[in-house]
Amino acid sequence: MMKPMTKALIAAGLLSASVVAQAGLSANIGAMSDYYFRGVDQTTDGASMMGGVDYEADNGVYVGLWAADLSNDDVEYDIYAGYGGEVGDVAYSVGYTGYFYTESDVDFHELNLNFGYEFLSLEVTFGTEDQPSGVEESDYSFIALTGEYEGAYLTYGDFGKDYSGDYVELGYGTTYEGLDLSIAYINADEDLGDRDTVTFAISKSFEF
């Protein structure tokens, strides 16, 4: 179960009401003490390196590539594209994300809808888990509501359809000397591993 908004925000552990990035080409590189996404631990070996490249045109169209190292020499790489804009005080984006793995035949394909208003943001996702030939695919949904205030955020996320489970994530992020730093506490129910976890992240973004 995997990821965007932009991968730079996810790598830093930061969410905001705005789902529209600045136009232009940017890149990010970072590390997490334990790579969690949507309340699910993505590694068994702890720390993970990650990075990506994003481009957004002046008209709101965006494309990107993001990757992270996982356990057992596996690498996750995500490809995404979409469109973002604003209607009054409401920011929105609609896009596609594909999640692929160098050591696995399973991949994920998602339709992502994001909305932001002042300090609140809402993610609504519909996805498909593609299995190797002969294995029936799974369909899932994911909804997350996030409130953010001066770098602190609280997220509640819930899976539906063929998946189940929910989690709460409480975190804080800041920028110091050009580095994005964050800490997050994640509480996941038994369907997502029944874990209470604290993670740390550091990342650096570059604009071209």
Image (tube, helix red, strand yellow):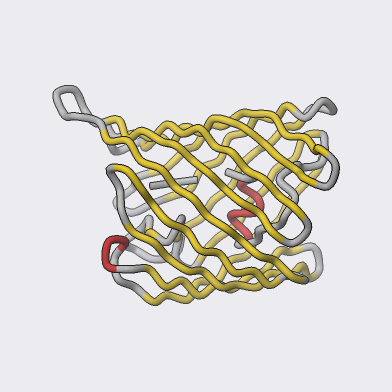
In terms of image quadrants, where is residue 75? top left
From the top left corner, tell me how far across and down residue 86 is, in percent: 80, 38
**Residue drawn at 73 percent across, 26 percent down:** 61
**Residue drawn at 75 percent across, 50 percent down:** 18
- Which residue is farthest front? 88
**Residue drawn at 34 percent across, 47 percent down:** 73
Q: Is residue 89 above or below residue 202?
A: above
From the top left corner, tell me how far across and down residue 131 is, in percent: 24, 31
Number of numbered discs = 0
From the top left corner, tell me how far across and down residue 130 is, in percent: 30, 30
Residue 141 as seen in the image, left or right of residue 192: right
Q: Is residue 113 above or below residue 61?
A: below
Residue 97 as seen in the image, left or right of residue 27: left
In terms of image quadrants, where is residue 83? top right
- Which residue is farthest top? 133
**Which part of the image, by quadrant, shows the C terminus?**
top right
From the top left corner, tell me how far across and down residue 185 is, in percent: 50, 75
Residue 183 as seen in the image, left or right of residue 57: left
Q: Is residue 176 above or below residue 131?
A: below
In this rendered view, identify the residue nearer to me: 22 or 207. Answer: 22
**Residue drawn at 51 percent across, 63 percent down:** 156
Q: Is residue 177 above or below residue 120?
A: below
In this rendered view, identify the residue nearer to me: 169 or 123. Answer: 123
